[in-house]
Image (cartoon, coloured by chain):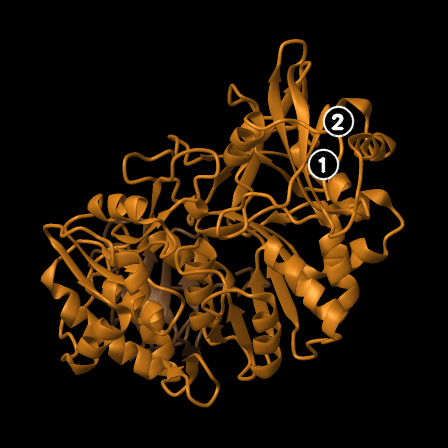
Chain colours: A orange, B brown
């Protein structure tokens, strides 16, 4: 089936339901369906070719997504924050195509054959005046629906292909049609080119939960919008949560309407989630693990596990806060070694995943094996109770003297230091050990700490092999625009700068 | 008729409509309404997924109508909903 059928179903049952925007003035399901049908008419000019969308999260996003689906064209949200060079290269790669882009991204594009360009505002003006498409949408579940550029934190970005069947499986597997209460509203602050932006739109819409978009994340604006719009549900990446917590602590805002907060898209530092549990005791937290190639979440740690971990005496139960919980129904996750042989409970290896929502496919090739498994390239383990622990990208695992070290474990300890605001750990080549542990540390304003103090702090919490051989003090860490630490950039930056054993205030 | 994934179906005997999510292929006949079998009557509801015991076939109801839904004469049952906490 086509994802536009999800919208058709919502609109046929409850056409007046506000699905995007303000409760009083937002877009209803019926209006969204009509605009998508009109957009399909306008998009009939380049059959099968991508619709590139380089805009922030506004009403144009769902209209263009469903319009493209109805017209049988893949929807390809791309980052409007890219520099002109990479932006043009990415567009050129998809020609012929239509590009709907804010001036900033498209402004510096050279003229390109086969490219139709418009701003979201201009394109929507044309769409509003168009006739609704009389064509029945193609229901072939194997057609590409969404093309997403993976974040490329460890290599060059790739174009992941999500077909209609991947997206509809994901939505139907966990969402009841119009199952949300009329008062429910979800705040979406990840951009359209992030998998959670696409998945959140589809599940929110199908569940009937009004979607409130925050086009550019800023913590204070997030808190104000959540309060003003009586937001009940939200999804954030870890860096966002850390900033939101700081605003809540400062302003005393308690967000009484908020019931449910999910986080994912990177490793959550334990001190941040513990403080969030403290400041928002009425909120159910969900830790979600997923990749672009797996159509968003494949495992979740639910509210009960968060509550149990918060009050538990048993360190094993507390440690579940560092896990991503258990696989979703219909999704299988296993741990295998480098040769592909299965590993037992508690053993570290690579996480492999299988299920109807798993695409594992790129524009150039599929990475799904004959049995349907996709290698995530994430290092991890599954404990004796079935909880999945993700320890970061396989490439980031530090191999020191034959021992595999997880950067996340060391980072957690560093961030627990009262003077440390942020930290990232990576391996640096070393003749004696193969690799040594290097820690990049960002101190809180005004703090002064010596390398030795940081090393001693780690030594009191972890085995000696995990103590950083070098500690480098930085004003901030290089991060992608959705908050992932760019280790390649960090490694490059630090191998080309002098090492001081003291922080410089 | 052949029921491929993505095929829209309007079975005889009911106003309910479906879209095929999963299908084993081969000659399949879907009928709706009529005499209730094994107490499987009642309304076929939009948004519910109907499947056989073996899980070989699965249909998503896209418009409600009177039940039951029969595949080659056997009643299909609504899959139990698994409401998951939302994660994005």
Residue A405 in sight in this render: no
Q: Nearer the viewer, residue A98 or A43?
A: A98
Label 1 belongs to which residue? A409
Q: Quadrant of residue A2?
A: bottom left
Q: Quadrant of residue A151?
A: top left
Q: Which mark is residue B44?
A: none
Label 2 belongs to which residue? A466
Q: Residue furthest front?
A: A505
Q: Nearer the viewer, residue A214 or A451?
A: A451
Looking at the rendered structure, the secondary structure element under dot 2 is helix
Residue at position x 81%, y 42% from top? A316
Residue A238 at x, y percent in the picture: 62, 54
Q: In the visual, does A374 lie left or right of A231? A: left
Image quadrant where one finds the C terminus of chain A: top right
Looking at the rendered structure, the secondary structure element under dot 1 is helix
Q: Dot 1, crowdedness within 10 Å: few (<14), some or many (≥20)?
A: some
Q: How many marks on residues? A: 2
| Pointers 1 and 2 in contact (C-beta within 8 Å) | yes
């Amino acid at each position: 089936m086509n994802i536009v059928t999800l919208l058709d179903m919502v609109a046929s049952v409850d056409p007046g339901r506000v699905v995007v925007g303000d409760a009083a003035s937002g877009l209803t399901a019926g209006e969204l369906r009509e605009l998508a049908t009109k957009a399909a008419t306008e998009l009939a000019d380049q059959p099968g070719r991508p619709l590139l969308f380089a805009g922030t999260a506004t009403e144009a996003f769902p209209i263009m997504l469903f319009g493209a689906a109805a017209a049988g064209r893949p929807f390809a949200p791309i980052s409007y924050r890219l520099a002109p060079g990479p932006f043009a290269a990415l567009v050129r790669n998809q020609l012929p195509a239509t590009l709907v882009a804010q001036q900033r991204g498209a402004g510096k594009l050279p003229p390109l054959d086969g490219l139709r360009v418009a701003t979201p505002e201009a394109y929507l003006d044309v769409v509003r005046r168009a006739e609704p498409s009389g064509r029945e949408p193609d229901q072939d579940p194997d057609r590409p629906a969404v093309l997403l550029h993976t974040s490329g934190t460890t290599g060059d970005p790739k174009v992941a292909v999500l077909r209609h069947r991947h997206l509809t499986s994901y939505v139907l597997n966990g969402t009841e049609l119009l199952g949300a209460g009329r008062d429910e509203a979800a705040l979406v602050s990840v951009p359209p080119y992030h998998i959670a932006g696409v998945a959140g739109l589809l599940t929110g819409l199908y569940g009937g939960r009004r979607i409130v978009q925050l086009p550019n994340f800023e913590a204070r604006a997030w808190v104000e919008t959540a309060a003003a719009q009586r937001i009940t549900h939200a999804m954030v990446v870890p860096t966002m949560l850390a900033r939101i917590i700081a605003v809540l602590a400062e302003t005393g805002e308690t967000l009484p309407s908020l019931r449910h907060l999910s986080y994912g898209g990177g490793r959550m530092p334990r001190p941040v989630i513990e403080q969030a549990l403290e400041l928002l005791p009425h909120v159910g937290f969900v830790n979600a693990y997923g990749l672009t190639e797996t159509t968003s979440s494949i495992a979740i740690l639910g509210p009960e596990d968060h509550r149990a971990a918060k009050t538990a005496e048993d360190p094993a139960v507390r440690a579940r806060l560092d896990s991503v919980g258990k696989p979703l129904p219909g999704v299988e996750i296993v741990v295998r070694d480098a040769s592909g042989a299965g590993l037992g409970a508690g053993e570290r290896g690579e996480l492999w995943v299988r299920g109807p929502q798993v695409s594992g496919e790129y524009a150039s090739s599929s990475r799904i094996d004959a049995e349907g498994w996709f290698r995530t390239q994430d290092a991890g383990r599954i404990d004796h109770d079935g909880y999945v622990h993700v320890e970061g990208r396989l490439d980031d695992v530090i191999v020191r003297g034959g021992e595999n070290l997880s950067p996340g474990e060391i980072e957690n300890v560093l961030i627990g230091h009262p003077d440390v605001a942020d930290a990232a750990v990576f391996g640096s080549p070393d003749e004696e050990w193969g690799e040594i542990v290097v820690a990049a540390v960002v101190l809180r304003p005004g703090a002064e700490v010596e390398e030795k103090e940081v090393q001693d702090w780690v030594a009191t919490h972890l085995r000696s092999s995990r103590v950083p051989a070098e500690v480098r003090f930085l004003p901030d860490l290089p991060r992608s625009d959705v908050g992932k630490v760019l280790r390649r950039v960090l490694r490059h930056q630090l191998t080309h700068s002098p090492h001081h054993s003291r922080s410089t205030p | 008729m052949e029921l491929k994934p993505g095929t829209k179906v309007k079975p005889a005997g009911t106003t309910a409509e479906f879209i095929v999510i999963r299908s084993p292929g081969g000659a399949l006949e879907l009928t709706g309404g009529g005499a209730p079998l094994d107490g499987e009557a009642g309304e076929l509801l939009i948004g519910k997924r109907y499947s056989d015991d073996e899980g070989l076939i699965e249909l998503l109801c896209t418009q409600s109508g009177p039940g039951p839904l029969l595949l080659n004469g056997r009643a299909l049952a609504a899959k139990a909903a698994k409401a998951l906490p939302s994660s994005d």
